[in-house]
Image (tube, helix red, strand yellow):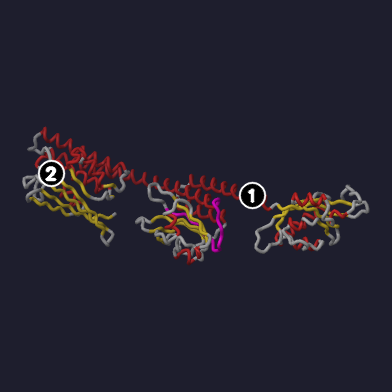
Amino acid sequence: MSSDIANCADETIFLSEASALEEGLRLGGVGVWRWKIDSDLLHWTKNLESVHHLPPGSFEGSLSSFQRDVHPDDADGVWQKIKASIEEDRPYRAVYRTSPRSNAGELWIESAGAVTTTCEGSRYLTGVCLDVTDRVRKERELERLLSQQRAVARFGSYALNEDDLQKVLNEAVQVAADHLDVPLTKILQFSDTADHLVLRAGIGWDDGLVGHGAVEIDKASQAGFTLMTDGPVMVMDLLTETRFSGPQLLHDHKVRSGISVVIPGAGARPFGVFGIHAREPREFDNTDAEFLQSLAHIVAGAARQAAATDHKMLLVREMAHRSGNMLQLVNSIAGQTFSADADPHAARTSFSERLKALARSNYVIARGGWTATPFRELLEDTLEPFGSRVIAEGRNVLLPPEFCFDMGLVLHELATNSTKYGTLGQADGAVHVNWTFRPRQNGTSVFCFEWEDPLANSAAPVKRTGTGFGSKLMTALIERKWNGVVTIANESNFKITMEVSLSL
């Protein structure tokens, strides 16, 4: 029991609306209450009704009325604190929600007080109440931000130390589900053909979809719309969404709301899309979107790290393979160039030029790490000494690196042939080069290449029935190695056509 004995003051403070003290409390947003312990009698100042967002005159002046106004989920906790204050004679403080109000959000009240005793010996629990809804919201928002920042830091550390990309993707969707409190999360990755997205990782989807489910990249899908948008895409209700209809995957899982962001890629093309979804209309905010974007950037970094590791291993294997092939090719070039009847000086010059052509081709392809190589770049680098005298037409298609390497040698021999017997050996004039790349239904594509020299004639050694090095090289590389077809026309000019079927 408290040793503080209250003065026998007039209790009209709880009854008089004209009281100056009550007016000050009203203006300050603070209400005063007094409950007579072991009874149902509870006094409070009139302004407490407004503090609790209750209609005027709705308070009955009873403990029961107060208890009904406490949210059912918080009622037991509040009452336990009241009992502890009375039994242990210590201050009482509680923060609780009021009972749900129709057409209103959560209302948070802070109540604080202590036990007092009147001069007659009556015991009261006396204190104040105030609306702390804004404070609670800000505290919760701060806690949410801190929680998300901690999650991003933990996930970043995990991704940095995990070599298995699939494990990183699985962890990412789990972190998103836990911290955004959603039942459905997904990471979509561009397929190898780049014409759709594949569900690489996810939570909440039907069995068998993760790893196999496909989503189109047109504007009708949320993922496709996200890829065309600068920034996160937030959906409050998919049923009323007007920007896109959403893919069947979302409708099959009764999705109503969510967020999706782009996962950046190593180049111009993104890695894919990171999405989270809820089955009820829900208003996500910028904090949620920024958290998801942070996870997406970490995923992008992990994907680049995994790609770099794979590329490094591929490059090491390719270097070992190419070094053996290149030595064989150099040996073949030497054998063909330094024949018994060859002029030593001319042979050395030819051999040197062919090695330079070999080096240029290798440099162009190695620049990209022995991956698919832009053919126009190869042609321009190989024929760079002839500048504008080579008129080239064709899309800058990406072709397999080994094929481009071989084509570099073919281009050199064609240019050498023209220098000796055709246009490039004259003071002016130009050779014409063009190529096309046509896809087939069986998954392969046909690369068709044409070289036309208006001044060369049938005396040129590079011809279908010839025995020169250029003819042998094209037979060995284009026809035998790549199963292509070489056609040479020697009429008023020299024209060579090559067709090769390639699998990309």
**Disc 1 marks which amino acid?**
Lys
Residue 356 lies, in percent from the top left, at 21, 37
476 on left or right of 294: left
* 149 relative to 83, above or below: above
Residue 163 lies, in percent from the top left, at 45, 47
- In terms of depth relative to the viewer, which is nearer, 255 or 498? 255
Q: Which residue is mark 2?
A: 469
Give the residue displayed 7% in from the left and 51% down from the top.
Answer: 491
The dot on residue 456 is: none
**Badge 2: few (under 14), some or many (20 or more) residues near its Cα, within 10 Å?**
some
Within the magenta stretch, is there residue 307?
A: no
Within the magenta stretch, is there residue 279?
A: yes
Mark 2 element type: helix
CB under 8 Å between callouts 2 and 1? Answer: no
- Please state the extent of the stretch shown in magenta in the rendering: 272-287
324 on left or right of 494: right
Residue 112 lies, in percent from the top left, at 77, 51
**Badge 1: few (under 14), some or many (20 or more) residues near its Cα, within 10 Å?**
few
- In terms of depth relative to the viewer, which is nearer, 304 or 321? 304
Mark 2 → mark 1, Cα distance in angstroms: 80 Å
The dot on residue 138 is: 1
Q: Residue furthest right?
A: 120
Residue 263 lies, in percent from the top left, at 45, 51
Q: Residue furthest front?
A: 18
Give the residue displayed 90% in from the left and 53% down from the top.
Answer: 10
**Disc 2 marks which amino acid?**
Phe
Mark toward the start of the polypeptide (2 vs 1): 1
Mark 1 element type: helix
- In terms of depth relative to the viewer, which is nearer, 248 or 49? 49
